[in-house]
Amino acid sequence: MTANGAKAEVVTLSSRDAVTVATADALVAAAAEAIAARGRFLLVLSGGSTPKALYELLATPAYAPRIDWSRTHVFWGDERCVPPDDRSSNYRMAREALLDRVPISPEAIHRLRGEDQPAAAAAAYEETLRGVFGAGPPRFDVVLLGMGDNGHTASLFPHLKAVRETSRWVMAEYVGEVSMWRLTLTPPALNAAAHVLFVVVGADKAAMLKRVLEGPQDIDLLPAQVIAPTDGALTWMVDSAATAKLGT
């Protein structure tokens, strides 16, 4: 389908678990392709309960050996400005669910330093990315994203500045909606990816998914609409509950 001017594939699965399995399979295939072509797999992780199940599956004996973790680098799409051992840290969740359970090099784990002063942390992460990609743009192999029930993705929140950023790859922004500073990749960084995978499940996301995919374009109100890879694929991995309102 075409969603707000961007060609997007919507893959509808029967259940939350089926979405998790299909997404894991997609990551295995993407890793093999990237490593065969370029010698490394560059993956951007997201936070939240839905990706946690994905990460736990990837760490199982059925999946972990299917990815060459010695050639995999992981990054984050966003982070809360908290220490890395905080229970709300996206890094902590991914470390406990996946990274501590697979043979990935510590040097290949590129976390956002949420414990540092926000603007400095954003600038430092941009330097990290430029060290990996050079002048850019940052060509990640896969970016995993979720979507909040307010239409946000990564830490691109409604009516804030980051969704309109055109040059910086990383920004810090205070999000009054959650009373917290957040660090986020910006649209120029996210949209340079080879493949963006949204993972959205549950009936509580159905109304917002319809607005984002089928409603008027308004990236300030619905930041998830800003995601439109300039030279890559866009896939929505969703369950039937989340797609219940599409086309109605």
Image: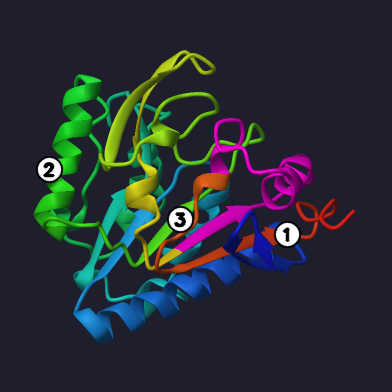
Q: Residue at x 74, y 61 (%)?
A: 15
Q: As shown in the figure, which amino acid type bears the numbered disc 2?
A: Glu
Is 12 included in the stretch rendered in magenta? Answer: no
Q: Residue at x 69, y 57 (%)?
A: 16
Is 207 included in the stretch rendered in magenta? Answer: yes
> In this picture, which residue range is highlighted in magenta?
196-224
Q: Which residue is mark 2?
A: 127
| Marks 3 and 1, how far apart at CA | 16 Å
Q: Position of residue 154 (x, y in %)?
A: 45, 40
Q: Residue at x 33, y 41 (%)?
A: 166
- What quarter of the picture does the N terminus occupy? bottom right
Say few, some or many: other residues with alpha carbon within 10 Å of mark 2 (under 14 / 14 to 19 / 20 or more): some
| Marks 3 and 2, how far apart at CA | 21 Å
Q: Secondary structure at mark 3?
A: strand
Q: Which mark is residue 239?
A: 1
Q: Nearer the viewer, residue 2 or 185?
A: 2
- Which of discs 1 and 2 lies nearer the camera? The answer is 2
Q: Position of residue 21 (x, y in %)?
A: 59, 69
Report if residue 68 is visible in the image: yes
Q: Secondary structure at mark 1?
A: strand
| Marks 1 and 2, how far apart at CA | 37 Å
Report if residue 85 is visible in the image: no
- Compared to 138, does 156 lie above or below? above
Horizontal side of 108 relative to 217 (left or right) equals: left
Q: Position of residue 86 (x, y in %)?
A: 35, 26
Q: Position of residue 141 (x, y in %)?
A: 34, 67
- Which of discs 3 and 2 lies nearer the camera? The answer is 2
Horizontal side of 204 relative to 175 (left or right) equals: right
Q: Which residue is mark 3?
A: 144
Q: Secondary structure at mark 2?
A: helix
- Compared to 148, does 196 lie above or below? below
